[in-house]
Image (cartoon, rainbow, N blue to C red):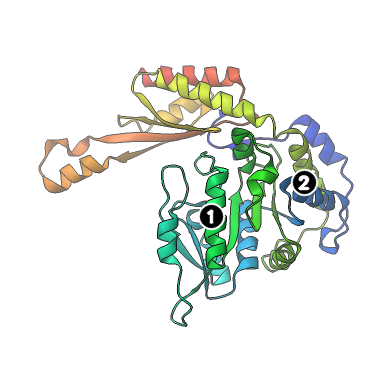
Amino acid sequence: MIDLRSDTVSKPTPEMRAAMAAADVGDDVWGDDPTVNELERYTAELLGKAAALYVPSGTQSNLCGLLAHCERGDEYIVGHHAHTYMYEGGGAAVLGSIQPQPVPTDETGMLDLKAAEEAVKPNNSHFARTKLLCLENTIDGKALTTDQHQAARDFADDHGLGLHLDGARLWNAAVALSLSPAEVAAPFDTVSVCLSKGLGAPVGSVLCGSSELVSAARRWRKVLGGGMRQAGVVAAGGLYALQHHIDRLADDHANAQRLAAGLAAIDGVTVTGCNTNMVFSRIDRDDPTLSKRVEARGVRADWRFARSYQERSNRESAPGDSRQGHGRFGRSRMVLHLDVSEADVDTALEAIAAELAT
């Protein structure tokens, strides 16, 4: 099965599995797991930070970072489509009593710093205390630039805020921008990076930052139930991924371009974006069984159907309009990763074209 739903579906390679099987392990809660210790040391060095913390998931990594920066009644400023705000269960608010303050993001994925300026609260007991600014790179596959990162750093310094990066796909950004991971991470106080999105590790993320912030995050990992014992077995997969699978992300970016070009050539498909390893497309017809039919041909790709805003507006202004049953369209995000080859891209395109021709 060719799976384009996400890069989270990538699987450990045989070489990675061998490294995991051979991993030297110990009790990580005691700090005795040598493989976890090496993964944390290596990741911190790779990102140019003083310390690092291995955790089971990116959601927990971001939450540990937020909790290390903020106290109850504080707030963090974040983009209105950011993962930490939209897709992490509201953990900062639910578990940390940290208020999110969303602000708009522009077409590049960068949050609006003018809106952020207006969102910063005065030092007054009536308000949550603004303590942290959060960025995401990549976001929808878009790589933020070093200039955008520096603008965020300057903003944070001007307002006495911490600066956190949800860098789950920082590796893709670094490859796309021809920068080292440390150069991408440099402006940030804390950075969360994922080992399983595209890199093929079975589980885990790493939070990097200063020794003080990582120490606080380590305590919060325990509070959140994330203490692990002989975790070196899975940490070895993450370490192997960092040592062998970052540079090859360029192949995923090239395959995304190939997929985008192929989709654009299919009648009825409009490519709306191609960013690093992600391709976004649209079909202007109501075809709710398309995903299942394409999967029957060996390709998993998720189309979701909704009514267009314009058509909804027409219906609302003219309830008797005969067009009420029309105007639906499908959107899809397809994500390239190490388990999808150039030949797989061509096979996927053939399957999609065949089903859209019916």
Q: Quadrant of the C terminus?
A: top left
**Amino acid type at image mark 2:** Val
> Left or right: where does residue 222 sit relative to residue 67?
right
Report x, y in % for residue 328.
Answer: 28, 36
Report x, y in % for residue 232.
Answer: 82, 49
Observer-nearest of 129 and 253:
129
Please tell me whether mark 1 or mark 2 is closer to you in this view: 1
Is residue 343 visible to us here? yes
Q: What crowding class fits label 1: few (fewer than 14 Cα within 10 Å), some (14-19), or many (20 or more)?
A: many
Residue at 48%, 20% (x, y): give it: 349
Q: How far is the residue under mark 1 from the one under mark 2? A: 34 Å
Q: Which mark is residue 234?
A: 2
Residue at 46%, 19% (x, y): give it: 262
Observer-nearest of 167 and 348:
167
Q: Which mark is residue 152?
A: 1
**Is 275 placed above or below 54 here?**
above
Residue at 61%, 31% (x, y): give it: 337
**Secondary structure category for the residue under label 1:** helix
Q: Quadrant of the N terminus?
A: top right
**Amino acid type at image mark 1:** Ala
**Is 339 placed above or below 121 here?**
above
Q: Which mark is residue 242?
A: none
Mark with earlier residue (1, 2): 1
Is residue 1 visible to us here? no
**Is 29 placed above or below 275 here?**
below
- Asked if disc 1 and disc 2 are in contact, CB closer than 8 Å, the reply is no
